[in-house]
Amino acid sequence: MIDLETELRSRIDGLKRKIVRKAVATCERRIERELPEKIGKELSELHAEKGFIRMRVERSSILKLCRLLKDSYKFNHLSLITTVDWDDRFELVYHLFSYPYNCAAEIKVEIPRDDPKVDSVTPLWGGANWHEREAYDMMGIVFLNHPDLRRILLPQEYEYFPLRKDFKMELE
Amino acid sequence: MQVNSEPAKREKVSFTGLVLKPMWATLVQVVRNSFRGKPNTVLYPRERLTVPPRYRGKHVLSFTRCIGCGQCVKICPNDCMWMKKINDPDLGKIERPGVDYSRCLFCGLCVEICPTDAILMTGEYELSAYDRKEICFEPEELRADDFPVREPKESTLLPALDFDRCKGKEECAKICPVHCIEIVEIEKTGRKKPEIDLSVCTLCGKCAELCPEKAFEMKEKLIVMFERPLPVFDPAECTGCGACSRACPSDVVYMVEMPGTEKTKPDGRKTKPKKLAVFVLEKCIGCGRCADACKFDCLKMVPESQLRESEKEGVRVE
Amino acid sequence: MDLWGISYELTSFLIDIINFFIYGLGWLLPGVLGDAFNGLGDWLASTGVLNILTMIVEALIVLIVAILNVITLIWIDRKLLARMWDSRGPFYVGPLGYFQNIADGLKLFLKQVITPSKADKLSYHVAPVVFIGSSILILAVIPLSPGFALSYERAPIPGGVLFAFAIFAIAPFSILVAGWAQNNKYTLIGGMRSAAQMMSYEIPLLLSIASVFLLAGSFNFGDVVEAQANIWFAIPLFIGFVVFLVCIVAEIERIPFDLPEAEAELVEGWTTEYSGMRFGFFLMTQYIRGYAGCAIAAALFLGGWHGPSIIPDEIWFLSKAYIVFLIFVWMRASLPRIRTDQILDLGWKRLLPLAMINLIIAVAMKTSGWF
Amino acid sequence: MAEMWINMGPQHPMTHGLWNLRIKVDGEIIVDAVPEIGYLHRGMEKIFEHRTYPQIGPITDRLCYGSSFTWNHLYCLTIENLMKLEIPERAKYIRVMVIEMQRIASHLMWIAAYAADLGLLAGFLWAMREREIFLDLMQALSGSRLTYNYARIGGVAADLPSDFERDALRAVNYFEKKLEEYEALYRDSKIFLMRNQGIGVLSKEDAINRGVTGPTLRASGVKYDIRKDQPYEVYEEIDFEPQSSPDCDCYGRYVVRMNEMRESCKIIRQALSKMPQGPVRVKTPLIGPQGDAIGRVEDPRGEGIMYVIGDGSEKPYRLKVRSPLFVILSAARQMLVGYKIADVVAIMGSIDVCMGETDK
């Protein structure tokens, strides 16, 4: 009896997974087809596989892309904003997630080192607020139109941006 | 301002019934541990805690098993270990690690990387002291030479070559059933060295049995689950100073004379010939002390996986 | 033999010893000096002075017994709570950890007393004294048996119950003052909560004991207890008993009604800025009030010292009081703390009507002549 | 009383760690709330950039004292994704089992702290007592009580000790019985319900928009569990049901966590029965390749993510940690405004605060 039940449940799970996979595939295809038209040539990279979409975009159109992803493709969860310091430039990596499609997206944006400014995505996802504050705190990236861009982990009067590669850690 | 309104489903408050249920539960608890057993607390200083055998507490160090390679010091994430030079009456001049427990994370990586199971974490957990210096343990304080290893690492028997004995008779290459031994002639020295391809070797031990000089010996080597670097030797820069040979904790490096490099002094006597380092990599544990000791930049540590790739590219390795 | 008698004997015995030396000096010393000593001896042995000294000795005896009771209550609290949550409680100091409280008291005594610089000094220092003083006053009127009660020439204090509750009502005042004087937001909120809670619970509390007065026809502890010789008031006035218990828990600020010092939200409530023995006073006063509450409950509802006479009256009384306290401990172990608005809801909307119903029942019983 | 600001923290019994919740109250009602964090910031991400791959392992344990194994495992998972390392099947099952034990221990610590917050000390010690059983099991397995350092890049540190399976099954059976006893203190207690139902409501839309994850999200009616929807390790082969509750309040979070503990018991049993024989570890490579990789797991507190960028050396170039509570705390205002001071404790307790991972 119990075996039958688990068997049934696992089959249902399998079916569900199949359906979700199909939905993801359609979502991916739609994105691959439609996004380059909508964003234009500022979208320099687009690559989708197994429910993970990688994108690279110019910083001027990050907000446009994010709005599009949120409104048209239901990427309703912003997981993470990572900042990377590649000595000559900064890179922001946004990890988005879509609950209905069960599908993830990664957007990379490059920012010149001497002008680290980018549009804030807090109006789209409230959860971006603290991520962006942390990015500002650690890497010194200024988010335009952010409601409350203060340092979050370090003291307000701290002068440095510690995760930059030119901030040397004192090793024993 | 967003104000959350109280939802309508809040039930009417009544204190009978649902208040008595938790009180019943606690009463059951009292009855249970008053009459059917004892409370959960361990009266610590009176009753001792029993720790499982894998407990990671204070270290013990076997001076005899330790070879002083210093890999534990290298892997320590918090730099809490250091190598101390000791003049031991029995073991001579040795280097052994000490542990600073004010920094130790008790992660156990030092035990895991040890190639000879010489260091172990015991179940001793009372390490508090009034002074930071008191919990900074010198190697002598950790010494316990013959402690039993609780969970010995897996080991393999590898044919270890003693190159001093080897006369280059090429017997082993003929004997080997899978032909994994290749005789390599070492330039300028006139000597031949059997080189084992471990990816083919079946560890049968025939070479050790039949070697006429007993140069091969099946030695136990513990398997460490961290990939380790191996030395890559560039003989062009080598001056034959022998620093690597002295630094090596596991007899990997042999200094071989190069006949024909003797110089005649003005008074007619001949100097000793120059020497060349020869590496028997089967025995190497990847500690990198030879590379640290070399002053002429002819040794470099390369990870095993990369080494195999570079071998394919034709870089000479000995 | 009652308490007055014991104290009187003890005092006169002590005065006899002292007078032996004084008269001796008077006999030895010549002239005016000797007469003065003789006069002093006579004055000490006069009735008025003897009565006053007897009162002091009696009060000391009552106080010591009460403090011992309080210590026992703290011990019971800790031990039983520990059992309820599956640990052991105090263990090392004294038999079964009985003297742990004394050790803790000593520790508090040795601790540094820190006064916040912005505190209102006068009220900051006066508040704990008022609090502990008023609480000890309650103990004065609580009898352990017909004999063991604070009395003057064998006449018990009239209106003892009323006096006890009058003193009980002083505490919110001192708590409010203490909370305000520390100049701290937590203490202020704690003091406010405490005042609101205690004042709103006074009313159902007094209503519930009004029914007892009605049935007993007296404000004296002695008379109330004697009226329960046949049946405890807790049986006919069961609603009143429950209301009384709930209200007394709120009055002595124990979980689930310990909002004024809800440690998770208000750090330590209105005692936050007190330290050392001042804090110790507050802590001890909580238990003194706890003991007073339990003893009053035992006297008014559980038949006081009535019981089979194999066991002395005092033991009967104390064991009843302890059992009431056990219920408090039990509630503390198994119930979470309730919220301010909920506690006031409960007080005004549930307990007050219940107390009124109880009073009506009492009136009905009295008029129908059952009591 | 006029409106005033109250600092709940950094030294305050409510905070469970070091953080500051500044609330503006009108009498007892909260009209504004500003969470401030950073008191426990240790610069983890900078430290990671200066350690080699095997050395980072024990440090990730320190990210969260409540559930150190999930972070340790997440790190190893991420690096394995980066190095494209295939780990043995048995190691995967062991990992799943230990993750679930850690989840139970973490949830037990949550319920203990939550009960203590609400003034229910029996609940505190009862939960700690059962947590001890699981800590003992983990101790027998890894050798440490709190910071296990049991996952390794390429498997787990050691195989199960002898008798472990028997002990684990016995512990799980015992614990399931005890869970029912707990319900007497919580679900059957009117005062507990009074303190929880309808308190700290976070609507579904708000929760998704604020990036809230984990039990807090599931208590807001979103049935999303990474273990089920994006399975890692061997969760695909294990039969369990992600728990959710439509209540959106503190009681919903309580229900979700209690049911998750029951599901965890089921998972442990299945993992033990399905566990194949074999090795538990492959060799840990010395250097990582160039490129980036992401690891995503269901932490007891929410969605844990590590994002690693390797530059071909033996140290990661960048290792970013996404801690669930960092995001959930930013939604504190949404949950708090409109309730009373006493509810702050319940609401902030119900999201299971752990400052170690929040401040990194």
Image (tube, helix red, strand yellow):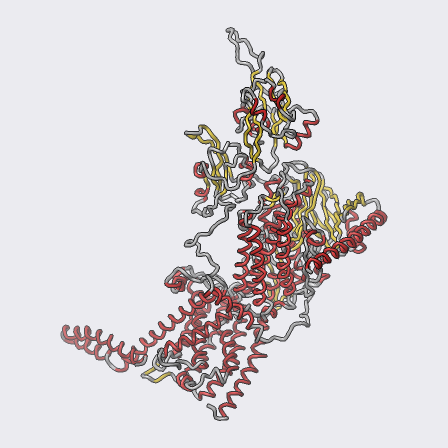
Q: Residue at x 79, y 43 (%)?
A: A45
Q: Which residue is nearer to you in this view: D87 or C169? A: D87
Which percent across, then down, holds residue A138? Answer: 65, 47
| Image quadrant occupied by the N terminus of chain D | bottom right
Q: Residue at x 51, y 32 (%)?
A: B68
Q: Which residue is nearer to you in this view: B141 or B114? A: B114
Q: For this view, does A40 lie left or right of residue C119?
A: right
Q: For this view, does A16 lie left or right of residue D285?
A: right
For residue B77, what is the image quadrant? top right
Question: Considering only vertical position in the picture, is C1 above or below A79?
Answer: below
Q: Which residue is nearer to you in this view: B209 or C312? A: B209
Which percent across, then down, holds residue C322? Answer: 43, 73
For residue B200, what is the image quadrant? top right
Question: Considering only vertical position in the picture, is C267 above or below B85?
Answer: below
Which percent across, then down, holds residue C370? Answer: 47, 91
Q: Which residue is nearer to you in this view: B93 or B54? A: B54
Would you say residue A160 is visible in this rendering?
A: no
Which percent across, then down, holds residue A47? Answer: 79, 44
Q: For this view, does A47 lie left or right of residue D313?
A: right
Q: How many marks?
A: 0
